[in-house]
Image: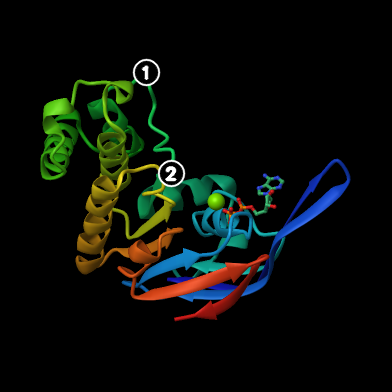
Amino acid sequence: MIKIRNLSKSYFTDELETTPLKNIDFDIDKGEFVAVMGPSGCGKSTLLNIVGLLDAPSEGSYEFLESQVADKSERQLGRIRKQNIGFIFQSFNLIDELTVYENVELPLLYQDTSASQRREKIHALLDKMGILHRENHYPKQLSGGQQQRVAVCRALITEPSLILADEATGNLDSSSGEEVMKTLVELNKQGCTIMMVTHSDEHACYAGRIVRMLDGKFVCEA
Ligand code: ADP
Ligand code: MG
């Protein structure tokens, strides 16, 4: 599903060059659950953003779903992303001005789904995630665990084939974190491919494969 070859990423700011990713080779097969670990600043989020088509490599090649990302326009990449990828972030990234229902509805508005189809899907998912009774609340009115559950619903509502989670449990208490992990495991069992950045050894153990990064490179794999 993901095939990265000799990929580097550099940023230039104030004549200073940072290279958070250095000549990386990395593959993820369909159906895998991969945990990425490593100290702060080693390039984990940079890699996740490139994998998620939110950022472009500086050098090297990236094939997503058997096609070269470099050959695509911004518009095509946006479409591929919306159809195939769900993101979960540490800071939830919910829109404060929208209700729970509206936040989860957002990704569906880019798709060809009628209002009644949307309502049915959203209600089913919110119910499954135990948050339906909060559908008219605003994010600020919810606990961190509830907000992350909403963010998980937003990531899942389009039934993506790839879930990218960047320290998704980092701001949660341990029982909410455990809930999110169980959801990811469940999704993986249903065939969803997962790439998850985490600082937690305990959470990494849920993955089928753990890769470790240091200074923009992979250092070992278990
Ligand atoms: P991690 O997620 O492992 O903590 P990041 O991928 O966020 O690490 O960052 C890796 C390095 O790249 C850091 O040194 C960071 O300062 C730098 N970096 C990340 N994003 C940018 C950016 N947009 N502009 C400049 N430097 C960046
Ligand atoms: Mg990060």
Q: Secondary structure at mark 2?
A: loop
Q: Is residue 75 above or below residue 99?
A: below
Q: Is residue 117 left or right of residue 201?
A: left
Q: Is residue 212 left or right of residue 161?
A: right
Q: Is residue 111 above or below residue 174?
A: above
Nearer-N-terminus badge (2/1)? 2
The amino acid sitting under disc 1 is Glu
Quadrant location of residue 60?
bottom right
Tell me the residue at 25%/46% (across/down). 176
Quadrant containing the C terminus in the rendered view: bottom left
Q: Are marks 2 and 1 in contact (CB under 8 Å)?
A: no
Q: Number of callouts in the render?
A: 2
In x, y percent, where is residue 179? 22, 51
In this orientation, which residue lies closer to the viewer: 132 or 175?
175
Q: Is residue 166 placed above or below 67 in the rendered structure?
A: above
Residue 73 pos. (x, y %)? 59, 50
Which of 86 and 144 lies nearest the eye of the viewer? 144
At 34% across and 38% down in the image, what residue appears?
107
Residue labelled with disc 2:
90
Task: Look at the numbered disc 1 and give the secondary structure of its residue.
Answer: loop
Give the residue type at disc 2: Gln
Q: How is the image coloured?
A: rainbow
> Residue 41 vs residue 106: left or right?
right
**CB at disc 2 and ligand 2 closer than 8 Å:** yes
Q: Position of residue 170 (x, y in %)?
A: 41, 47
- Marks 2 and 1 sit apart, C-alpha to C-alpha, by 19 Å
Residue 59 image-quadrant placement: bottom right
Q: For the residue carrying disc 2, how many other residues have a C-alpha within 10 Å: few (<14), some (14-19), or many (20+)?
A: some
Name the foreground residue: 146 vs 54. 146
Q: Tell me the tag on residue 97.
A: 1
Q: Is residue 207 left or right of residue 6?
A: left
